[in-house]
Amino acid sequence: MADRRLHVFYNVARLLSFTKAAESLHMTQPAVTFQVRQLEEHFNTRLFDRTHNKISLTAAGERVCFHAEKIFEIYAELENSVRELTGEISGVLILGASTTIAEYMLPALLGDFKEKYPDVNIRLKVSNTDGIVSMVENNVIDLGVVEAPVNNKNLAVEPCRTDRLVAITPPGHELSKQGNRQGNKIPVQAILDYPFICREEGSGTREVIMDYLKESGVEAAQLNIIMELGSLEALKGAVEAGIGVSIVSRATLLKEIKLGSVEVLELDPPLERPFSFVHQRHKFRQCAMDELLEFARNYCENHKADNE
């Protein structure tokens, strides 16, 4: 409902990038540039300084950005107020989730939510945990769901459910034989003797594993990392192929356990982590966002046993 030129400008100002703004708005970069130039012509002044492929806000741009944020918040309050009166839950929500959550937890949750609230349109962006937190910080997404701790105290973090991580090996692997002799458990130090496959830098799973090793008295440098993969499916495939062993969420192994394509070993001590919702602490939330958060809380409560 707000001025389109102002909306486009505000996204560029937040991201300090015409390219990233175009991606977030599902527009072409020339279209974004055109809208910003139209606004600059309206105010008869430059709103951005452009030097060496970098942009920054001018003094006028900073003032426009400050008031634009207030304008959009007032519009959101207006829409919420009317929808509360009519009982309508609608709008667009932009979610972000790390890969494990997007592939194995969110489809069922969002499917159930969409069935209850068909007028809410949900867009999902997938990235690793660092990327999701960055998108929340920059207001690119309304709500993030992550698999590692979040250290930004300006963001609200709400644990959803506990996820248990386990070691996986190819069938008949020496490590699995050792685990079978010890009640299907292995000390974490036992992994150091075998080639290890891990997720990429920035992955929440990798961060949690490295913190766990450190707490268990194991230095990350002791791991015999032979491969780093940005896809969980690729990682599991590499283990199935006998390339090495790994540590993954048990919730992602339903198919592999059923097929017997990997062997699952509990870690000693156990390794658990929270799946958490993260959003701006002070950002005004529309009704649809509140409904999604409440729906997700109930979903997580009802599916606590899924990872056991």
Image (spheres, grey):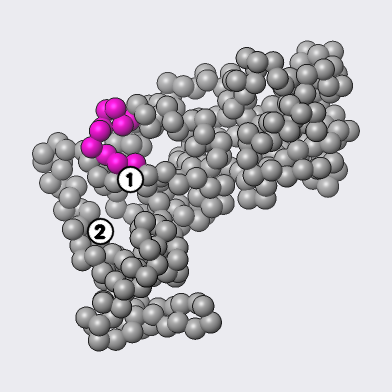
In the picture provided, is 179 more to the left or to the right than 236? right
Residue 137 pos. (x, y %): 45, 57
Q: Residues within 10 Å of mark 1 (few under 14, many from 20)?
A: some
| Res 156 seen here | no
Query: Marks 2 and 1, how far apart in space?
Result: 15 Å
The residue at 49%/30% (across/down) is 105
**Magenta span includes 62:** no
Say which residue label 2 marks: 73
Q: Which residues are magenta?
A: 113-122
Residue 62 pos. (x, y %): 35, 77
**Magenta span includes 119:** yes
Say which residue label 1 marks: 93
Q: Earlier in the sequence, mark 2 or mark 1?
A: 2
Secondary structure beneath disc 2? helix
Q: Quadrant of the C terminus?
A: top right
Q: In the displayed image of the protein, which residue is found farthest to the bottom?
A: 44
**Quadrant of the rendered image containing residue 206:** top right
Q: Which amino acid type is shown beneath numbered disc 1?
A: Leu
Using the image, determine if residue 294 lies above or below residue 15: above
Q: Quadrant of the N terminus?
A: bottom left
**Quadrant of the rendered image containing residue 228:** top right
Q: Nearer the viewer, residue 150 or 46?
A: 46
